[in-house]
Amino acid sequence: MKKWIGWLLVLVVILVLGGFLLSRPKDVLYDHVQATTQDLTTYYSFSGNVEAKDAQSLISTTMFQVNEILVEEGQWVEKGEVLLTTSQGMKLEASVSGEVSTIYVREGDLVTSGTPLVDVTDYEHLQIKVKVDEYNIIPVSVGKEVSVHVNALNQDYSGSISHVTKEAQISSGIAYFIATVDIEENANLYIGMSSEVKLVNESVTDAIVLPMDAIQFKSDETPYVYYQNENDEVISKDITVGISDGVYVQVLSGVNQGEDILVPKAIEIKTPFEMMKHSNK
């Protein structure tokens, strides 16, 4: 008996809910959006960290005693400039131009082979190395302009691709290449900052667009939209779409500029148990 009462209650709720939805004004069931015209661009996106384009870690290759250190931390040195001398008369030079970032030894120290001595880093010329999977490598070529978004600064900078490896690296069965991006000089950039590199994929101008949630899809992936006809009836029609930037979708046919499109609202439907629980409070 209780089972039949439960099923009867469910049926009543369904009938009441159906009547409620059918009787609701269309403005309650749908939001209205207008098809607008704007430029639309899609991007390939890659992530990486800012690093120095040129850097040197000077390491001893033999045992010697440090005689004289000719530079100090923070000093700018040119390529070929002597950094320190040894008691044996050797002169150890900078192989790159840059700033002396770290000095690991002191005058008089006796060092063995493999001991770090001095780091020189060029902080003025920075780059980012990004991984590009094999399916996206074709459009990634030397000379292409890119946009670099540095997360910590929330700023965008200009850059260009300066090098792309010709041999893939394999990781977990996935082949990827390394692309190097040179970044415009900027004093606010620091080595290690995380960034997003964006390369233009497709771009259209003066495209008719709709928000993504205005586009519905059939079981066969055919896109369609809802609209109101002259008899105030809500009907659907198929459309053809183009590119999407994740927010807006280009409409190639089926919708005119300024046309009013209906977007179904999300309706919260409570189960009979939830409705009974709420009514007993």
Image (cartoon, rainbow, N blue to C red):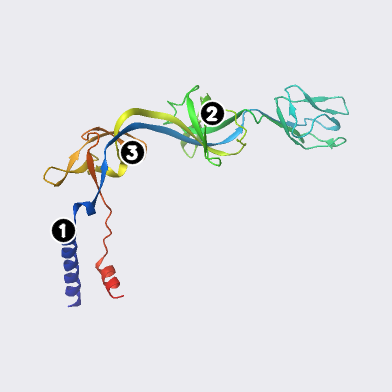
Disc ID at residue 142: none
Q: Whole-percent x and y of residue 45?
A: 45, 35
Which of the marked residues, 2 or 3, is nearer the chain's N terminus?
A: 2
Which of the marked residues, 3 or 1, is nearer the chain's N terminus?
A: 1
Secondary structure under the numbered disc 1 in the rendered image: helix
Q: Residues within 10 Å of mark 3 (few under 14, many from 20)?
A: some
Q: Is residue 39 above or below residue 21?
A: above
Q: Is residue 229 above or below residue 9?
A: above
> Residues at badges 2 and 3 in contact (C-beta under 8 Å)?
no
Q: Whole-percent x and y of residue 237?
A: 18, 40
Q: Quadrant of the C terminus?
A: bottom left
- Nearest the camera: 256 or 151? 256
Query: Disc 1 residue type?
Result: Ser
- Nearest the camera: 155 or 27? 27
Q: Whole-percent x and y of residue 209?
A: 29, 35
Q: CA distance from mark 1 to mark 2?
A: 59 Å
Tell which residue pokes out farthest to the bottom in this image: 1
Secondary structure under the numbered disc 3 in the rendered image: strand
Query: Disc 3 residue type?
Result: Tyr
Residue at figure coordinates x 15%, y 61% from the top left: 19
Q: CA distance from mark 2 to mark 3?
A: 29 Å
Which of the marked residues, 1 or 2, is nearer the chain's N terminus?
A: 1
Q: Residues within 10 Å of mark 2 (few under 14, many from 20)?
A: many
Q: Residues within 10 Å of mark 1 (few under 14, many from 20)?
A: few
Q: Which residue is mark 2?
A: 181
Tell which residue pokes out farthest to the left in this image: 231
Q: CA distance from mark 3 to mark 1?
A: 32 Å
Q: Which residue is mark 3?
A: 248
Q: Quadrant of the N terminus?
A: bottom left
Q: Nearer the viewer, mark 1 or mark 2?
A: 1
Q: Whole-percent x and y of residue 265?
A: 26, 52
Q: Which residue is mark 1?
A: 23
